[in-house]
Image (cartoon, coloured by chain):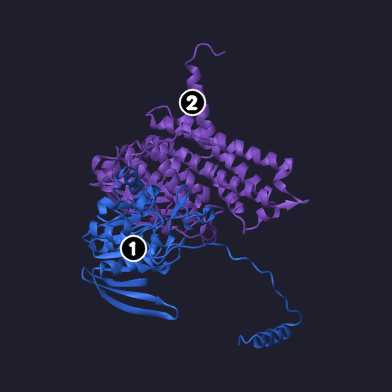
Amino acid sequence: MDYFLTEDQNMIKELARQIADEKIMPVRAELDEKEEFPWEIIKVLASSDLMGLCYPEEYGGLGGGTFENCIAVEEISRACIGVSVCFAGTGLGAYPILLFGSEDQKKRYLPDIASGRKLAAFGLTEANAGSDASGIQTSAVLDGDEYVINGTKQWITGGGEAEIYTVIVMTDKSRGSRGASALIVEKGTPGFTFGTKEKKMGIRASATTELVFSNCRVPRDNLIGRAGIGFIVSMRVLDRTRPGIGAQAIGLSQGALDTAVSYARERKQFGKPIISFQAVQHMLADMAIQTEAARALVYSACRFIDSGAKNISKVSAMSKVFSSDVAMKVTVDAVQVLGGYGYMRDYPVEKMMRDAKILQIYEGTNQIQRNVIGQELIKEYAGKKDNR
Amino acid sequence: MNVIVCVKQVPETTGVKINKDTNTLIREGTKGIINPFDMYAVEEGLRIKEKLGGEVIAISMGPPQADEALREVISYGVDDAVLLSDLAFAGADTLATSRTLAKGVKKVGGFGLIICGKQAIDGDTAQVGPAIAEKLDIPYVAFVRKIRDISNHTLVVERMMDDGYDVLEVTLPALITVVKEINEPRMPSLRGKMKAKSVDIPVWGISELGISEEEVGLKGSATQVIKIFTPQRHGNREMLEGSVEKQVDQLVSRLDDMKMI
């Protein structure tokens, strides 16, 4: 389908695809097997300018928006979402600075992130706080001109590998979620260490660790925006990055569909390629329908966000839920089309199926996304007089 | 130091057609790719630029569509490019090609090093690089697998041989042809691709190069292809039977009979 991309957007797609085909496809199985952070690929993405897509030119970026970034994420995800989460995760860490940071913070951190010299990461989740951000226990207490941070963040994407962390902490516990604030913490700050790397079902090329803060002191200047808006920062950031999960999902679905179709064309049973059997054709057709529908929704969400619209929560959540549910189904079906071969690690679809599951979980489970959509519907319809 | 890289657009190996009159490859209208060996030349040029500064300039002789190949190398980081294109250049052999390219290189001027791929995958002659150096009267080293050291005046390289390698020091300006062992070409960049889209690539023909029609193309060629054909396959084969030892004995005695060993 032609989505009428601009010349620059087509260039991004072409470049990301070339990197995916030449640099990621050949090593994805090994990265998964060894649970190895893909630094070599990150370096390639950086020198190709792709790490800077969504940052303004004044901070060394290319001045694109959510859509430009998602186009790259989609193409990388066609090869491996373990790699694409390393790519997209740095954007998640940088967005709080980009959206709410001071001019000084933007100048200090964004050029290194946009050039790919440094990676960023976002620290929200804790053992007892995920979707319920008010349960955050990591605290930051102002002492003179410094915040003293104590507590532990969990399952942080890019943990240990990233240099710049934006962390949501409680600066005033008595105010619940209105007592949360966002702080920038650099790797190497005394009192800031990493827990062991998690062993995951999928996206095993990416690093997921605890961030451990023990009397870690950071300058007061590292506060993003003002104290008390940490929860708002998180929600606004996630509204903008969720289509990125959608982009991972459509890339992954496309990769699974590509593999399934080419296998079905070659695999012969009863003297014919299995793609000639209607049972297989229908499975492939459904995979293609769902992937294309998800793509159309993700692209529309991206364009809506980049238009400067304010009420993006609903459509952003929709693009994440729909396409990640699609990715799960499409990858399960891809394994089915490949049959016994699909279950073996020699073929890429078993990894794709393992990888797909996280898309329904991270950046807010699909159940929480449906809550968001439901809440938005309640708000929308409350304002309408005639409900028929 | 400025580096000139010679680039050739070659037909994708699946789409090769032959002109029956001239017995040369038909380049117009077939999908072109950059000769793979030339990508190693481009990469090495970019690495020298990163080390010593200066510019990398790509030059190509070919039909107008070779402009695509030059734009592509610009997306990898090459600074500038020139296309040598003229109807009179058609049908050139290695002599006429190297004469034309040498003229182009001279007109670009100001270079410390010229880098070519070891050969093109269509003609496979490996002659054009060295011949350009001859025309320019500068030293050359073919089949370079590593640049050990480079300054603005000298170059130390490893030349790949069948059984090892030679280490050679040459004064600059010089020409080298490179083998694929020399590096791993990088990926293009987005800024490079944007530049490639809009950059102006000059086209130089015989008048710009100050060269006569007799010196270029088919007319300026010392060789002519008389006939080109695919050799017929002869299906004479024989399978040896029996245990491995028996098969080896049979093979040795047969080769002995044929005076091959």
In the rendered view, does A116 fall on the left or right side of A266? left
Residue A8, how many percent across, how many down?
Answer: 38, 40
Mark number, residue A220: none
Residue B175, how many percent across, how many down?
Answer: 30, 68
Mark 1 to mark 2: distance in Å?
Answer: 71 Å
Vertical side of A352 occupied by A325: above or below: above
Vertical side of B136 occupied by B22: above or below: above
The chain under label 2 reads A
Mark number, residue B98: 1
Q: Residues within 10 Å of mark 2 (few under 14, many from 20)?
A: some
Vertical side of A179 occupied by B116: above or below: below
Q: Residue furthest right?
A: A270
- Closer to us: B175 or B257: B257
Say what secondary structure mark 2 lies in.
helix
For residue A304, what is the image quadrant? top left
Say what secondary structure mark 1 lies in.
helix
Q: Which chain is purple?
A: A
In the rendered view, does A10 fall on the left or right side of B207? right
Which residue is found at the position 77% from the left and 51% from the top?
A: A271
**Residue B75 visible in image:** no
| Residue holding disc 2 | A376
Q: Quadrant of the C terminus of chain A?
A: top right
**Amino acid residing under circle 1:** Ser
- Closer to us: B92 or A3: B92
- Closer to us: B160 or B108: B108
Q: Which chain is blue?
A: B
Which residue is found at the position 41% from the left and 39% from the top?
A: A9
**Residue B216 visible in image:** yes
Residue A45, how many percent across, how many down?
Answer: 40, 52
The chain under label 1 reads B
